[in-house]
Image: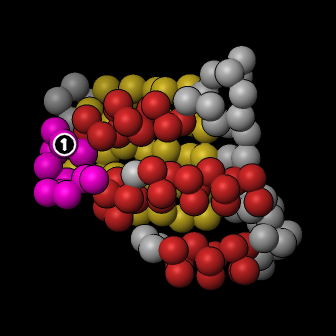
């Protein structure tokens, strides 16, 4: 789901309890606002991400260079979690959401630094702007 029309469709279908038929939590307006902000600030990263609503009411972004090198970001209405799998060492690096700085306050800094670096390192796109 990598464009605004898809996100609008997801909003209409996932903003209520049990949207998946298996008891999924509704995706909140606050969570959608963060996803829209990511789309607007980082259109190049958004275009190359696999973006999905999750049953716990959050969104997942995944950037994959190959099956052993990927970056995952899960965004909720107030917090995020992120991790990167490194092929070279089979190491998983975690990027926890700080709680003192406000709701998702530094998710944009994480995208600007770590995710952009990952995308450039593995040449995921020629146009990340």
Residue wearing tag 1: 120
Q: How is the image coloured?
A: secondary structure
Of residue 117 and residue 4, the one placed in the foreground of this image is 4
Residue at 62% over, 77% down: 8
Q: Name the side, left or right, on which 98 lies relative to 67.
A: right
Q: Position of residue 93 (x, y in %)?
A: 39, 26
Q: Is residue 68 visible?
A: no
Of residue 102 and residue 28, the one placed in the foreground of this image is 102
Q: For residue 6: magenta?
A: no
- Above or below residue 65? Residue 83 is above
- Above or below residue 40? Residue 121 is above
Name which quarter of the figure residue 54 lies in. Answer: bottom right
Q: Is residue 79 visible?
A: yes
Name which quarter of the figure residue 59 lies in. Answer: bottom right
Residue at 72% over, 80% down: 13
Q: Name the side, left or right, on which 123 lies relative to 25.
A: left
Q: Position of residue 124 (x, y in %)?
A: 19, 54
Numbered circles on residues, count: 1
Q: For residue 124: magenta?
A: yes
Of residue 117 and residue 33, the one placed in the foreground of this image is 33
Residue at 49% over, 37% down: 108
Residue at 48% over, 57% down: 40
Q: Name the side, left or right, on which 113 lies relative to 17.
A: left
- The residue furthest right is 17
The magenta segment: 119-129
Residue density around tag 1, few if under 14, some if 14–19, many if 20 or more, within 10 Å: some
Q: Position of residue 109 (x, y in %)?
A: 46, 31
Q: Name the side, left or right, on which 86 lies relative to 11.
A: left
């Amino acid at each position: 789901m990598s464009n605004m029309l898809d996100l609008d469709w997801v909003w209409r279908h996932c903003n209520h309890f049990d949207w998946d038929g298996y008891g999924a939590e509704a995706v909140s307006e606050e969570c959608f606002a963060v996803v829209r902000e990511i789309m607007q600030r980082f259109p190049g990263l958004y275009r190359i991400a696999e973006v999905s609503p999750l049953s716990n009411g959050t969104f997942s972004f995944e950037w994959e260079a190959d099956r052993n090198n990927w970056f995952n970001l899960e965004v909720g209405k107030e917090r995020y979690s992120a991790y990167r799998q490194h092929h070279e060492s089979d190491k998983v690096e975690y990027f926890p959401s700080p709680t003192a700085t406000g709701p998702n306050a530094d998710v944009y800094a994480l995208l600007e630094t770590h995710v952009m670096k990952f995308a450039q390192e593995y040449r995921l796109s020629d146009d990340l702007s």
